[in-house]
């Protein structure tokens, strides 16, 4: 992987953790998802003006991805309601890269060189260790439903990552794929909210309008950069590097939410930095 791709994915990871932290503060789940969706649709519409319409062969990937993204958003917000941000977030993000790596190698036939394979393994070790520490932290034990929902979120992340990784390569032009994914993905939950809540929806949206829309725009930036990187590098290393958001999320949780950072998170961060160095071919 080139330093440019690594830098882009790491920036995307920090952006991803930021929008998750912003939405974590919104207690009204439906209002949160509606505004994030609206932010995505608006951002996607701007991008669509700058890119060609995806080819017909790409639309099955887009439709599958949209359904998976909707399920992911619902599961993510529900896990945030059930457990601490600093605990459920590493679990959700830790499941995904392992599953993506296994699928990319054994199903898609991607080949990882020695340094890349070692780097991927070291980063996954750090993420999994951080997730396990979060589960075993006796000062704030997450419930079974919180762990289960976080794990389900991770599975959905893995599946949509693979679907989008293949789809964006088929599309050729990453910007068009990103734009229409965000437009259609963003419409689903706001449409559901408008149909079911009607006049009651606007009073729920007003108090969290700005953070919700900002969260949606940041999610477009974050995932758009990841999709671009997937056209420049193998799927597995990109998926693994994206999980640097776990460390960024832990730092945000410690600084803004006063959750404990602790030695295990420092150790996990060290492992992730070592893994990134290996993927860059450095020591």
Image (cartoon, rainbow, N blue to C red):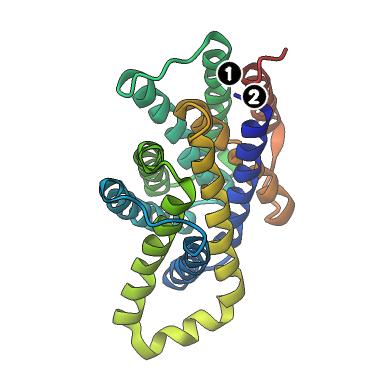
> Does 92 appear above or below 26?
above
In the rendered view, does 251 fall on the left or right side of 103? right
Name the outermost residue toward the front. Answer: 52
Q: Residue at x 49, y 87 (%)?
A: 203
| Res. 247 in view | no
Indicate the position of residue 233 as horizontal and vertical percent values.
52, 28
Residue visible at 61% across and 20% down in the picture: 279
What residue appears at the point 52 percent right and 34 percent down from the top-left corner?
131
In the image, 96 versus 132, the foreground residue is: 96
Q: Is mark 2 on a helix, strand or loop?
A: helix
Q: Residues within 10 Å of mark 1 (few under 14, many from 20)?
A: many
Mark number displayed over residue 278: none
| Near-viewer residue (69 or 223) | 223
10 sits to left or right of 227: right
Displayed quadrant of residue 34: bottom left
Q: Nearer the viewer, residue 252 or 58?
A: 58
Query: Residue at coordinates 40% horizontally, 37% vertically from top-left?
Result: 169
Residue at the outermost bottom position: 199
Residue at which label 2 appears: 276
Q: Mark 1 points at which residue?
A: 119
Q: Please say if 90 is above or below 23.
A: above
Q: Do the residues labelled 2 and 1 touch (CB within 8 Å)?
A: yes
First-in-chain label (2 vs 1): 1
* Distance between the alpha carbons at the discs numbered 2 and 1: 6 Å
Q: Does residue 118 lie above or below 175 as drawn?
A: above
Q: Is mark 1 on a helix, strand or loop?
A: helix
Measured as percent of width and height from the top left, residue 282 is found at 71, 15
Number of other residues with Cα within 10 Å of mark 2, as a class: few under 14, some 14 to 19, many 20 or more = many
Question: In the rendered image, is residue 5 in sight?
Answer: yes
């Amino acid at each position: 992987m080139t330093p440019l791709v690594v830098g882009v994915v790491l920036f995307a990871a920090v952006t991803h953790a930021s929008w998750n932290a912003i939405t974590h503060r919104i207690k009204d789940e439906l209002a949160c998802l509606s505004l994030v969706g609206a932010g995505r649709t608006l951002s996607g519409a701007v991008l669509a003006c700058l890119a060609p319409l995806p080819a017909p062969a790409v639309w099955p990937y887009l439709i599958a991805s949209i359904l998976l993204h909707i399920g992911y958003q619902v599961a993510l917000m529900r896990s945030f309601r059930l457990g601490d941000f600093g605990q459920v977030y590493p679990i959700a993000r830790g499941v995904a890269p392992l599953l993506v790596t296994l699928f990319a190698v054994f199903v898609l036939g991607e080949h990882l060189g020695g340094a890349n394979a070692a780097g991927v393994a070291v980063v996954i070790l750090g993420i999994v260790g951080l997730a396990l520490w979060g589960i075993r932290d006796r000062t704030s034990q997450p419930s079974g439903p919180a762990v289960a929902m976080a794990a389900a979120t991770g599975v959905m992340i893995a599946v949509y990552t693979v679907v989008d990784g293949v789809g964006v390569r088929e599309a050729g032009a990453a910007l068009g794929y990103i734009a229409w994914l965000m437009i259609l993905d963003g419409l689903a939950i706001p449409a559901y909210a408008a149909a079911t809540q009607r006049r009651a929806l606007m009073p729920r949206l007003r108090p969290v309008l700005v953070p919700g829309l900002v969260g949606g725009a940041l999610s477009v930036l974050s995932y758009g950069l990841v999709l671009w990187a997937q056209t420049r590098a193998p799927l597995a290393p990109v998926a693994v590097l994206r999980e640097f958001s776990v460390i960024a999320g832990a730092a945000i949780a410690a600084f803004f939410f006063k959750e404990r950072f602790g030695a295990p998170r420092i150790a996990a961060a060290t492992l992730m930095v070592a893994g990134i160095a290996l993927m860059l071919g450095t020591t």
